[in-house]
Image: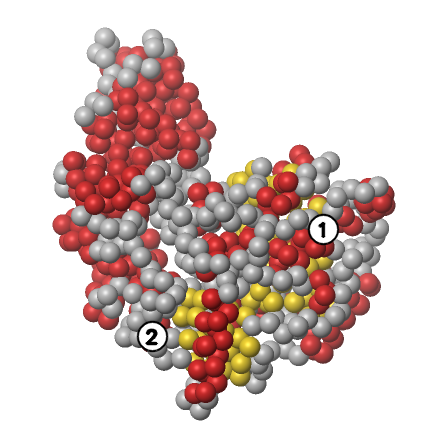
Amino acid sequence: MPSKASLQALLLSLLIAACTSDSGDLPGSQESGDRQAKGAQTNFLLITLDTTRADRMGYAGYSKARTPHMDALALESAVFANARTHVPLTLPSHASLMSGLLPTSHGIHVNMQGALPEDVPTLAQSFKSSGYMTGASVAAWVLAERYGVSRGFDTYNDVNEDLEHVTDHAERPGGEITDETLAWLNENKESPFFYWAHYFDPHDPYTPPAGYQDFEDPYDGEIAFVDHQVGRLLTWLEENGKEENTLVVIVGDHGEDLDQHGEGTHGLLIYDGTLRVPLLVKMPGKIEHRIIDDKVGLIDIPPTVCELLDLSGPGEMDGRSMVPAINGETMAEAPFFAEGEYSRRSFNWARLRSFTMGDWKLIDSPSPELFNIAEDYGETNNLAAQEPERVAQMREAMLSYLSSKTVRDAVALNASGDADAALAALGYVAGDGGTIEDDPMDLKEPRDMVNVFKGMIRADWMLKRKEATEALPLIQWMVEQSPESNEIYGLHGNCYFQLEQFERARVNYERALEGKGDNPHHLTRLGNCYKKQRKYDKAEECYRAVLAIDPLFGAAHSRLGWILATRREWSEALDHFTRCVELDPNSVNARCNLANALCAMGMPKEGLKELDAGLSLNPTSRPLIRTKISALHSVRREEEALALAKRALELFPGDKELQAIHDGIVNGPTPIKINSLDEIEQHQQQIQGNPR
């Protein structure tokens, strides 16, 4: 770990470089100061950096970094050199950031398994109740509104899951997040504001955009790109006179292993490579630049923000204010807790919990690890065997610490109780990750399973590249290594589905759902197997169970609407297709389904509106063009229909159906049929990477 002195020297050199540049006066600073003097509330800009290691920043001494904007910000900020997350996963870490609570207290331990309980107030609610305008732009589906971290935001721009491919990797690039943030700030700059911008770009796979691909490690390119986006936001503050009246907090949600301990990415293990995060806090006039070595966590940010801005806090919080450290005072030593429940809840391996007291860190598991992190920064020398008494004392202290905290469970996305009945009808039960006290000692150590975990990630991306044949041997090896893991059977099912071996896919999805029947992804994919096998009643049961678990799961609405439409049950089909468009207005497939249903129900004018909306997203969508030709013909707009048919044949020469439609219009009076739903499905399967 770089020493405090070396960090100070680096920042001093950056400061000298900044002073020798001709930056000019900061526009609007006097106006901002005048507003503050008049009692204007201080704004708050929160920027979260997904999957960003603390030691990959320029200001932290990393020579290969290209992070000039955050380096410059660090010169004016309180720089927390020992900040950590409490869980190396996006949703639970942001839940802690927004509530000031540990995962055990707010109930969310892993991504996509439940929502923030209603009795957990959030930081955004505190700002809203104090008269602030509140907004957010998040880049990953795991932070979608349904999971509860959106509570208190007037505007919450999130990501919907991929309606067609049922993926949990839907994301938005950083440029889109910045554009959206700046648009909101411009609309609300006359009011006190709290805005949260979340950047997901450094997440694997590391594919930096053009202009950021000249790095030895593409991960560094991703971080450099995010730094550019952060710079755009900081420039807006300067140019609009908001810099002097805005608290800026930049923080990572978790780090990345980068094979420091063999994990590669994050989520499974809880070494500091995935726990330590960058944390900068800037507030002109209140915060002087200093580097702070105190151990702090994400739960400490809400009480700190509330004290700095004189706000009432969200409620009871596990965190404590960092203001004393910001003011140069020594904070009382406090223990630090982190957890790794992903291994237990998704793979049925042992859960991990870590407890840090002073220089000592315990990772509690069936075979515990103990590190002196002051001397062993990389956590490579396990001292548990030499220090059994310390291990026992720290475990006892950890359990005592946890017993003093409120314990909650994440709430089901649909609390009506319909989900249990729907799952029971299918022969499944909801998943249960176990309680803190329920900790079997015979489960596999996650650190012994890192090759299987890395194989999961590799195979998943192979399937996304349509390399199922190549992925199959790897997945079969993982099943042999870990037959107890539901997630591996789910991946096995995905592979067989891509190979069009639907019966084998079905068997694996059923294995994945054993004991965890409330997984909407696996249930939807099981329904897809039944659909491919033309067992539509069974498919319908699966999709209805998914919607009982999660009424906002768009893929299930899409598939269920298709089945209902094949039965000519148009009214309910229309409801589901309409819901798909509401959930993802930018989905071309959703627009196409809805338009076809409207046209089939004798409402071609309404269908045309949806077709035009879809074609504005993708002007060369063959299903949309075909349906629009038919819809135009049905409302006697023959000239427009013929002109579109001619253009379509130029776009798609040799398309027999388009030729037949064209000839039908020319020769008349043969009616032009709307695409059959089988044809629609075939075209949907052909469409890849539609604009979102």
State the residue lying farthest toward the bottom: 386
Q: Residue at x 29, y 65 (%)?
A: 348
Residue highlighted by disc 1: 309
Q: What is the three-letter code of the residue carrying label 1?
A: Leu
Q: Quadrant of residue 301?
A: bottom right
Res. 144 visible in picture:
no
User: Quick one: quadrant of the C terminus?
Assistant: top left
- Tell me residue 515's x, y (percent): 24, 56
Q: Residue at x 56, y 48 (%)?
A: 122
- Tell me residue 599's x, y (percent): 31, 18
Circle 1 SS class? helix
- Give the vertical position of 444 relative to 372 (above or below): above
- Applied colour scheme: secondary structure
Horizontal side of 583 relative to 601 (left or right) equals right
Q: Earlier in the sequence, mark 2 or mark 1?
A: 1
Q: Residue at x 56, y 67 (%)?
A: 84
- Tell me residue 679's x, y (percent): 23, 31
Q: Quadrant of residue 645?
A: top left
Residue highlighted by disc 2: 445
Question: Mark 2 packing: few (<14 Cα in 10 Å), some, or many (20+)?
Answer: some
- Give the vertical position of 586 relative to 126 (above or below): above
User: Quick one: quadrant of the N terminus?
Assistant: bottom right
Q: Residue at x 51, y 49 (%)?
A: 120
Q: In the image shown, does 637 or 261 lie closer to the viewer?
A: 261
